[in-house]
Amino acid sequence: MPIDPSAIIHESAKIHKSAVISAYAVIGANVEIGAGTVIDSHAVIEGPTKIGKNNHIYSFASIGGDPQDITYQEGQESNLVIGDDNLIREFCTINRGTEKENSLTRIGSNNMLMSYVHIAHDCQLGDHIIMSNNASLAGHVRISDWAILGGFVLVKQFCGIGKHSYAGMGSQINKDIPDYMVAAGIHPKIRSINSVGMKRRGFSSSSISSIKRAFKVVYRDSQGRLLDHALNELEASESDSHEVMQFVECIRNSRVGIMRGPVDE
């Protein structure tokens, strides 16, 4: 049965006929649930929230709750949008956005959010992201495609996690991790490039070598000179590398500054 009779569903909710709503799930007002999405027992979905196709939201997840922001007031515009093919495991919490930043929290597609993950108001997540158990994001965090966060990673508000990057277990992140980098440690540093992840995702050896050179320019050879000079050097010497140009753009667009590297220890 697609909708269990014990589920509590608000009359304004829009649920695709192929979605599955399990026993004792609660679907609130202004919630849309797309085709093939499964909501397990005792999960709570509040609105305004739009959930796409073929997602699986496990028991006791709390999705679309009010922002945990002291300036938020009931009646303000506040939305959550979730894409397709996401796995959202038990006890995850995802809050809607605030008027401080487009009134929107957005989760992309093909992500895995493991148990007890928390995503705060106004966060923006791309696609193919893995957040391990108990990883938590403060408000306004941006995570780009293919990033991986280990268990118990904590990310400060407004920080960015770059494409194909990796944050090791227990890292307390208060600066941006640029594209393709590995950060590790309780007080983390950039340790290396994510060569393992790049190989797994089919990057060529030349692309990986280009990112290695970029890492060296920014994190090993830049002592005593401005970061902007290192980025200018990369733009001149590696302009034919799409990956390096992404790396440079990621750093230039940082809102809080980038994480320091191993030579700063």
Image (cartoon, rainbow, N blue to C red):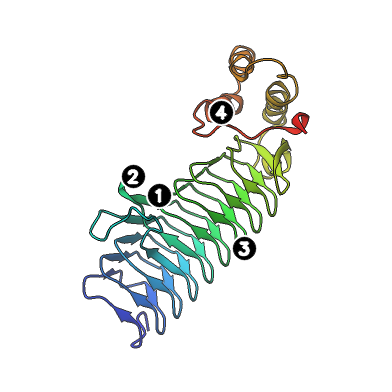
Residue type highlighted by circle 1: Asp
Indicate the amino acid at tag 3.
Answer: Asn
Q: Amino acid at mark 4?
A: Ile
Q: Disc 1 to disc 2, how far (Cα)?
A: 8 Å
On the image, the x and y values in percent for residue 170 come to 68, 54
Could you tell me which secondary element the residue under label 3 belongs to?
loop
The residue where tag 4 is placed is 251
In the picture, the disc for residue 133 is 3
Residue that badge 1 annotates: 122
Report, in whole angstroms, how far the alpha carbon at label 3 lies from the one at label 1.
21 Å
CA separation in Å, label 4 and label 3: 28 Å
* Picture coordinates of residue 191, whole percent (x, y): 74, 37
The mark that comes first in sequence, 1 or 2, is 2
Q: Residue at x 45, y 64 (%)?
A: 55
**Callout 2 secondary element:** helix
Dot placed on the residue nearer the N-terminal end, 3 or 2 = 2
Disc 2: CA contacts within 10 A as few (<14), some (14-19) or many (>=20): few
